[in-house]
Image: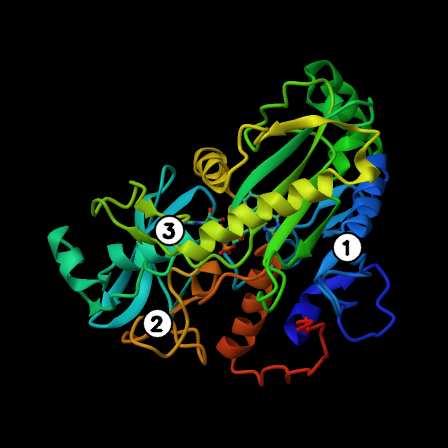
């Protein structure tokens, strides 16, 4: 909690003063949820028996609420902007872009630098007292494997000299799968117009001149977290409302107006892996997700789709409800729903866990130091160190981990834990 609070400058209300940070580098604003479809969402949520909560990032995650974003004055604040831009002039900082790190250079089992390749400078080695990998859930395990840290047998097969046999590297990959439950909208209230090319110049102009309009929001302005079965200890489904029907690749719904819930179970058991296919660093590794490979994951999907339909068919949506476009009435039985999920679902872009921290035999990173186990001078700090996928989006947890890791690396006393109460579901029976 103290590190989540350290990263954020929250502009909303937190009457308790317990859950939100006020002076961090990343601005966090509550969406204004002005589209009438969001009003219908909250009304429908109440009609379906869900709670309307103040802050899904505060005391109670379970329920429906406007969501937060890192958008301030129409501009998104990412890590480069909030953390690197203010210190670009430091003499001990050299930012190299357009370069691919191709391997960690070892002296025995001590990391002493990285080799990188760029079109401008070709290949070169940068030496350092130590190396911190933060290439993300695909690249950090890929680089470790390319550098000889991973499953020794598999590395030898690819002709890579083994520095340390660490079979957990690249394993334990988790992700949130997401599918779009899409409805036709009978009234011209959705944001579907912004997908038409003739509206692009107006949208662009509004943003360029005033930082307002449809380009000043991510449109994922509200949603909820629900439990889809009574024995779930915490909400296991995330439902994000989008006041237009569109796939991640930009394909719009086939009707003039539409809306959708982006649905995703949050605690998947399915685990996959990242494995090299070759010892060429410029070639992508093989990514195997094994989505839907456990009974519970399949059950969560069926329940999630049913709960979402129940929500979108509440009286509050009656004046907009033009019928379900996706998955559509043909997906009625559990099997039909699962077939649709298997065909239609996409990644939510939340891969993690491939260099998990821990103390068991499969652990890659030591949680006390973020050091790669079994070698010296090498740490990993990114989404790959998460042992278990978080119960929502990953960006804030990655930043929280990075802030704490910074203290561990610098030898600072870590911030003391804060013991804050949070809502726990008490089963009725
Ligand atoms: C399209 C998309 C939308 C998302 N939306 C959200 C959202 O709305 N909310 C949310 O919470 N999360 C969202 N996420 C997830 C979130 O962005 C990631 O979980 C998070 O950024 C992971 O952080 P990371 O530091 O582990 O890796 P990354 O942010 O991926 O950072 C890794 C960096 O390392 C660089 N890199 C990798 N390999 C090399 C190499 N060999 N040499 C040099 N550089 C290298 C990459 O270019 C990248 O800059 C989204 C992700 C995607 C892809």
Q: Is residue 217 above or below residue 114?
A: above
Mark closer to the chain start, 2 or 1 = 1
Residue drawn at (55%, 56%), measured in percent from left and top? Answer: 266
Foreground residue among 237 and 145 = 237
The residue at which mark 3 appears reads as 293
User: Residue 49: which disc?
Assistant: 1
Identify the element where label 2 is drawn: loop
Q: Position of residue 355 (x, y in %)?
A: 38, 64
The residue at which mark 2 appears reads as 363
| Residue 48 placement, left or right of 120 | right
Q: Position of residue 118 (x, y in %)?
A: 37, 42
User: Residue 321: which disc?
Assistant: none
Q: Is mark 2 within 8 Å of ligand 1?
A: no
Identify the element where label 1 is drawn: loop
CA distance separating discs 1 and 3: 31 Å
Q: Position of residue 208 (x, y in %)?
A: 78, 30
Residue drawn at (45%, 81%), measured in percent from left and top? Answer: 368
Mark closer to the chain start, 1 or 3 = 1
Q: Position of residue 77 (x, y in %)?
A: 68, 50
CA distance separating discs 2 and 3: 22 Å
Quadrant where the C terminus lies? bottom right
| Residue 105 placement, left or right of 64 | left
Q: Is residue 333 above or below residue 265?
A: above
| Residue 187 placement, left or right of 235 | right
Residue drawn at (72%, 72%), measured in percent from left and top? Answer: 423
**Total numbered circles:** 3
Foreground residue among 179 and 367 = 179
Identify the element where label 3 is drawn: loop
| Residue 279 placement, left or right of 30 | left
Residue 244: name its quadrant.
top right
Residue drawn at (59%, 43%), measured in percent from left and top? Answer: 305
Quadrant where the N terminus lies? bottom right
């Amino acid at each position: 909690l103290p590190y989540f609070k350290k990263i954020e400058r929250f502009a909303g209300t937190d009457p308790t003063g317990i859950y939100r940070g006020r002076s961090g580098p990343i601005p966090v604003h509550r969406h204004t949820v002005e589209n009438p479809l969001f009003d219908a969402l909250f009304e429908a949520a109440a009609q379906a028996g869900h709670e309307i909560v103040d802050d899904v990032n505060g005391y109670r995650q379970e329920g429906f609420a406007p969501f937060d974003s890192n958008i301030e004055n129409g501009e998104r604040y990412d890590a480069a902007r909030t953390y690197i831009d203010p210190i670009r002039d430091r003499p001990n900082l050299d930012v190299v872009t357009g370069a691919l790190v191709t391997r960690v250079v070892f002296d025995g089992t001590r990391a002493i630098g990285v080799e990188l390749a760029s079109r401008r400078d070709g290949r070169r080695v940068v030496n350092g007292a130590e190396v911190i990998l933060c290439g993300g859930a695909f690249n950090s395990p890929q680089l470790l494997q390319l550098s000889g840290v991973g499953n020794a047998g598999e590395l030898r097969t690819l002709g890579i000299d083994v520095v340390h046999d660490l079979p957990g590297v690249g394993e334990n990959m988790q992700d949130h799968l997401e599918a779009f439950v899409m409805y036709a909208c009978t009234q011209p209230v959705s944001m579907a117009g912004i997908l038409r090319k003739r509206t692009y110049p107006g949208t662009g102009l509004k943003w360029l001149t005033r930082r307002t309009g449809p380009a000043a929001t991510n449109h994922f302005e509200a949603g909820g977290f629900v439990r889809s079965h009574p024995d779930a200890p915490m909400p296991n489904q995330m439902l994000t409302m989008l006041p237009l029907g569109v796939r991640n690749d930009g394909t719009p719904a086939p009707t003039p107006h539409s809306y959708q819930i982006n649905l995703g179970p949050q605690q998947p058991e399915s685990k996959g892996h990242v494995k090299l296919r070759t010892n060429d660093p410029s070639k992508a590794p093989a990514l195997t997700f094994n989505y839907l490979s456990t009974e519970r994951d399949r059950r969560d999907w069926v329940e999630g789709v049913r709960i979402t339909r129940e929500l979108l068919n509440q009286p509050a949506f009656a004046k907009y409800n033009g019928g379900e476009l996706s998955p559509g009435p043909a997906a009625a039985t559990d099997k039909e729903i699962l077939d649709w999920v298997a065909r239609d679902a996409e990644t939510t872009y939340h891969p993690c866990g491939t260099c998990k921290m821990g103390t068991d035999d499969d652990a890659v990173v030591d949680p006390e130091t973020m050091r790669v186990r079994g070698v010296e001078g090498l740490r990993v700090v990114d989404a790959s160190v998460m042992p278990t996928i978080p119960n929502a989006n990953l960006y804030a947890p990655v930043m929280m981990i990075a802030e704490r890791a910074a203290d561990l690396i610098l030898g600072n006393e870590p911030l003391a834990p804060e013991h804050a109460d949070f809502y726990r579901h008490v089963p009725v029976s």
